[in-house]
Image (cartoon, rainbow, N blue to C red):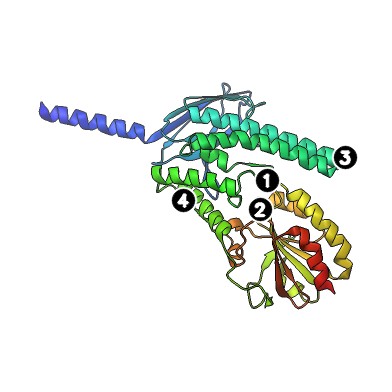
Amino acid sequence: MKKIFFSLSLVLLLVSCGKNNKFTIEGNIQNASGNVLYLEHVGVSKVSVIDSAKLNANGDFKFKKERSAFPEFYRLTLGKQSIDVAIDSIENISIKADSVSFVKDYIIEGSENNIKIKELSALRASTANTLNKLNKSLANKEITPEEFINQARKAVDAYKEIAQKHIVENPGSTVAYYALFQTINGLVIFSPYDKSDNRLYGAVATQWDYLYPDSPLNKHVKNMGLMGMKALRAELPLDYNIVKTTEAFDINLPVISGERVKLSEIAQGKVTLLEFATYFEQGSPEHNMMLAKIYEKHKGKGFQIYQVSLDTDEHAWKNAAVNLPWIAVRDPQSIYSEIVRWYNVSTLPTGFILNKEGEIVSRIADYKKLEAEVIKHLK
């Protein structure tokens, strides 16, 4: 009798463990008969398809997969539309949607965190739509660049305020992680280079490091926060007083065509502004407008700009860089870049002036003094 009881207990334990190690996403997609629904795993550096289902006349689907020991992000993709889903301690999630309004009007049950993620996703889509309309109005000259900047900033700030509340409310949640890394039309909402935003990276990293120390997501947010913190605290390792680029740290990065442009080669015979920047942070459009005025005024006298973008979204960077009249390159390593560490870039934008011999002669701490510095070395 004891042997039977022991065997039965072992079976129940194995069944229980098996259940706890799996998650299920199931539901129904209306008006999607014959279409293929994909389940994708969203990792730190790539998105991979892990399963798919051809929808029947009723649109029913069910995915059952092994669950990780720590939270992971997935998405359901139908055509070009995707629904983001977080899997933490939840085992069963139900999603009902219509193919026509797949992302906008889906209903998700079984997870409070995923309901909040849906709300953030909807707000992000609404903000992106606002920015697209503003871009169209700007292109049609219905609004001025200044009006575009002010209205775009207002829209992004409204989104950021709500996203930040989710992060502060529970930094160890999947909602906080999701909110921290969202972008809108290529715009990084929370930058590790910003002092206030870096504190949010620190809050999420602290909680995730305690709860999920072995999670790749934890390692990612921790590295981002630390890199940003190091940059913010950094001091110049070199005395940039008459240092040639070839003797310090040369830069060889691609422009939008893919062709690499070497700083030390183009810097000979011209006064060069070497600048580290991002095109999608608040204030970036107006900063580039200021640069454009100085560039147009002095380019005929031998002034040029070599601008290094640290934007993570290559497509969005290309769309922005194609309109710039100067040399615009991009470092795909973003804040992981060795170049950032070499030059100890602590804030964005940060600039350096190179004289006609290719020597780094000054660091631009106050951009109000940029033109005077350019004029001084053009003489």
Circle 3 is placed at which residue position? 140
Q: Is residue 40 among what the camera can see?
A: no
Which residue carries the number 2 mark? Answer: 311
Determine whether label 1 and label 2 are within 8 Å by CB. Answer: yes
* Kind of residue indicated by mark 2: Asp
Q: Which mark is residue 281?
A: none
Alpha-carbon distance for marks 4 and 1? Answer: 23 Å
Q: Is residue 248 left or right of residue 216?
A: right
SS at circle 3: loop
- Disc 2 to disc 4, C-alpha distance: 21 Å
Residue that numbered label 1 is attached to = 186
Q: Is mark 4 in CB contact (under 8 Å) with mark 1?
A: no
Distance between the Cα atoms at labels 3 and 2?
27 Å
Q: CA distance from mark 1 to mark 2?
A: 8 Å
Q: Which residue is under mark 4?
A: 219
Q: How far is disc 3 from disc 4 in space, using C-alphas?
A: 45 Å
Earlier sequence position, callout 4 versus callout 1: 1
Q: Quadrant of residue 346?
A: bottom right
Amino acid at pointer 1: Gly
